[in-house]
């Protein structure tokens, strides 16, 4: 084991955590990965046994109580949060930013406190005009946050050993008056409503709802999940593509979809299946 690698207790689930772990793993000694509320008891024991272990969190989804937070003082547990805090606090920052029409996406490194996503901020980074691809946005922000941590964890570890000689970056408090909040995505949001939404809004819902709660629509009396699509502004009615007309007159062209209880397929295969019935 390379003793120069900082020991990490990692908290997290989901794609943000997965991408962060991929970046952190070769550069740190991850002694435990907490995924559930029950894991927190193991975290406490390990932290007492390894007082120099640092805490990093990404999309954990479990409230960490004060007794656990205090074990990680004075450094605290550092949270990779995918937004420009205090904007988009809460459970769905990336999805909410996509739905809001954002084209720029940010990541913040903050110290965890009992109040949700309200802790002091060590670092923030913004990516301008990112491609509207949910997987790519998650990965870009996770890697950026984890990379910054790797570059600064040694200084944070030194802070634990000698707080008076810390080289760790200074933090700043959040302006709570500017905070906005997000909620968990809900299955009730699944069904698209292009008859009242513009093509841009519909497309952003398709992108934001990938994986969960899944963007659904009824095509030819079949419920389908739309996996990918694009906007066609000048759509000739004669073209035999699979499309949805939206409230602004523009059309969403469906590229890939998944009918209920069937495998994902492209639009041509779906149309061919209808023709062969």
Image (cartoon, rainbow, N blue to C red):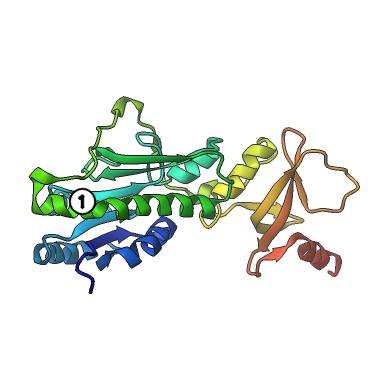
Task: Decide: is 179 above or below 109.
Answer: above
Question: Could you say which is closer to the camera, residue 165 or residue 29?
Answer: 165
Residue found 12% across the figure and 65% down from its top: 50
- Residue placed farthest to the right in the image? 238
Q: Is residue 262 left or right of residue 173?
A: right
Q: Secondary structure at mark 1?
A: helix
Q: Position of residue 7 (x, y in %)?
A: 21, 63
Q: Quadrant of the C terminus?
A: bottom right
Residue 24 in view here: yes
Q: Is residue 253 or residue 148 the one in the foreground?
A: 148
Q: Determine whether, in the image, residue 37 is placed left or right of residue 83.
A: left
> Which image quadrant for residue 85?
top left
Q: x, y (%) of residue 46?
A: 15, 66
Residue lying farthest to the bottom in this orientation: 1
Q: Is residue 197 or residue 92 the one in the foreground?
A: 92
- The quadrant holding residue 154 is bottom left
Give how far across and how far down residue 255 sits, in percent: 72, 56
Label 1: which residue? 155
């Amino acid at each position: 084991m390379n003793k120069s690698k900082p020991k990490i207790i990692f908290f997290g689930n989901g794609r943000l955590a997965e991408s962060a772990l991929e970046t952190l793993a070769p550069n740190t000694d991850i002694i435990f990965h907490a995924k559930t509320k029950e894991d927190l008891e193991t975290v406490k024991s390990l932290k007492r046994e390894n007082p120099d272990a640092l805490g990093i969190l990404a999309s954990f989804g479990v409230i960490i109580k004060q007794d656990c937070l205090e074990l990680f003082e004075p450094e605290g547990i550092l949270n990779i949060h995918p937004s420009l805090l205090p904007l988009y606090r809460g459970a769905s920052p990336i999805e909410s930013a996509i739905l809001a029409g954002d084209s720029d996406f940010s990541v913040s490194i903050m110290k965890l406190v009992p109040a949700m996503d309200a802790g002091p901020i060590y670092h923030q980074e913004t990516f301008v005009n990112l491609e509207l691809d949910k997987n790519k946005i998650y990965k870009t922000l996770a890697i950026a946050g984890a990379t910054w941590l790797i570059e600064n964890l040694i200084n944070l570890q030194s802070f634990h050993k000698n707080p008076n000689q810390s080289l760790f970056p200074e933090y700043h408090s959040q302006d709570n008056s500017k905070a906005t909040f997000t909620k968990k995505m809900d299955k009730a949001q699944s069904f698209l409503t292009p008859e009242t939404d513009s093509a841009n809004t519909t497309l952003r819902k398709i992108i934001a709802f990938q994986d969960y709660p899944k963007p659904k629509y009824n095509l030819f009396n079949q419920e389908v999940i739309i996996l990918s699509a694009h906007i066609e502004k000048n759509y000739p009615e004669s073209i035999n593509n699979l499309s949805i007309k939206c409230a602004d007159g523009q059309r969403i062209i469906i590229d890939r979809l998944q009918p209920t209880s069937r495998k994902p397929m492209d639009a041509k295969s779906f149309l061919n299946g209808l023709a062969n019935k």
